[in-house]
Image (cartoon, coloured by chain):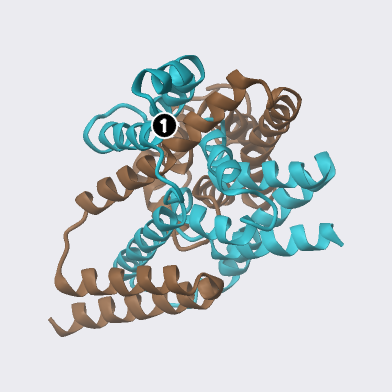
Chain colours: A cyan, B brown
Amino acid sequence: MEALQVILTFLKIGLISFGGGWSTVGIIRHEVVPRWLGDEEFRSLIAIAQSTPGPIALNAATMIGWSRGGILMAALATLSVIAAPILLIVGAALLAKRASIDQGALDESLRTTSLGMMIMTLWALRPVSLDPLYALYAVAAFAIGAFTKINVLWAILGAGAFNALAGPWVRSLLGI
Amino acid sequence: MKRKMEPGRGVGDSAETGRPTPLGLFLTFAGVTTVTLGGGYVIVPVMGRALEKRGWMEESRFYDIFARAQAFPGPQALSTSILVSRDLCGFPGAVAASLGVVLPPFLVIILVSKLISDYGSLPAVRGFLEGAGAVVPGVVAAMIWRTAMRRKWNVRKIAGLSALAALLILFPSASLPILLGGILVLYLTEALWKRCR
């Protein structure tokens, strides 16, 4: 019955994921950690989702589905996460002509909502134990993302490459 | 009125109108999601430029539709591409566009997942994944910072945001009702406040 759980979980995620991208990561984490993935694993998964083609929620669904049962589960999870948005868009097309909506107010409301979800994401991804080297990577990534025009993708890939090549050496150098 | 564009602008144009065929839309969106690394905020601008370059839609119109797409849940690249394609060539276009957005990332992720399950235990790969994962909170904090800096703030908005974030953090299991309720309350206060001013 795991297939059913995967379908229901990703249907729900698809339905809640307003604002797209980073906003939805906190929600996804709440649904899959610790049930299917560990904390570290989830963080790596998000890093991969962010540095591969395609929307994060979609990538996360495919990857988690894969880890639960190969390509079939991956396809189920991916279809489930896009089902609700697609149905809503088709449904709204039938209704929207009649409703009068203040688009400006709706935009404001959705922007605030998606920012609230991003704050939830940040809270959900807070490190459980403080590792000085990893904290340093995170602070550097924040500085790059917030104050430069460099795509954060390079911060993610750079930290990965640096850690793979020099991580153990830096640790022994600093004695941590 | 359909705007007549230069004829013969590439694969996927139907000959008389300069409008895309479903196949053309599929190829365009598949191309865009294959080459863009990262989430919706990277994909959407590339999509807009691709549509304008092919003469299918002006960028300003594209961003109007993008604004409407925000009202739907789900990946924004997906909802935007569906709305745009429905506009350009109806239901078949929308189906073609969804396939174009979904299929390439799906195949890439399957490939990457397979590589990780085969080689994930090697120290170098583990080191890479841990290092890449460690920066994620920093990246999210940077996105929050940027998004917050782009907006004009007042007490009402800050109060709304704080309440929403606190509720989501405290009651993550109730995220669906919190979000739907939050969107409605924020929308109504915003609309009323505008009217009363």
Residue occupying the point 63% across, 56% down: A34
Residue farthest to the front?
Answer: A175
Q: Write down the quadrant of residue A169 in the picture.
A: top left
Between residues A164 and A107, which one lies in front from this camera angle?
A: A164
Q: Pointer 1: what residue?
A: B49
Q: Is residue B94 above or below residue B139?
A: below
Regarding residue A10, the answer to whether it shows in the image is yes
Regarding residue B4, the answer to whether it shows in the image is no
How many numbered tags mark residues here?
A: 1
Q: Write down the quadrant of residue A84 in the picture.
A: bottom right
Residue occupying the point 61% across, 39% down: B101
Q: Write down the quadrant of residue A156 in the picture.
A: top left
Q: Is residue B99 above or below residue A29?
A: above
| Neighbours of disc 1 within 10 Å: few (<14), some (14-19), many (20+) | some
Q: Is residue A161 above or below residue A16?
A: above
Which chain letter matches label 1?
A: B
Residue occupying the point 53% across, 76% down: B174
- In the drawing, does residue A101 fall left or right of residue A87? left
Q: Is residue A112 above or below residue B58?
A: below
Residue B99: x, y in percent?
A: 69, 41
Between residues A154 and A80, which one lies in front from this camera angle?
A: A154
> Helix, strand or loop at disc 1?
helix
Residue A164: x, y in percent?
A: 51, 19
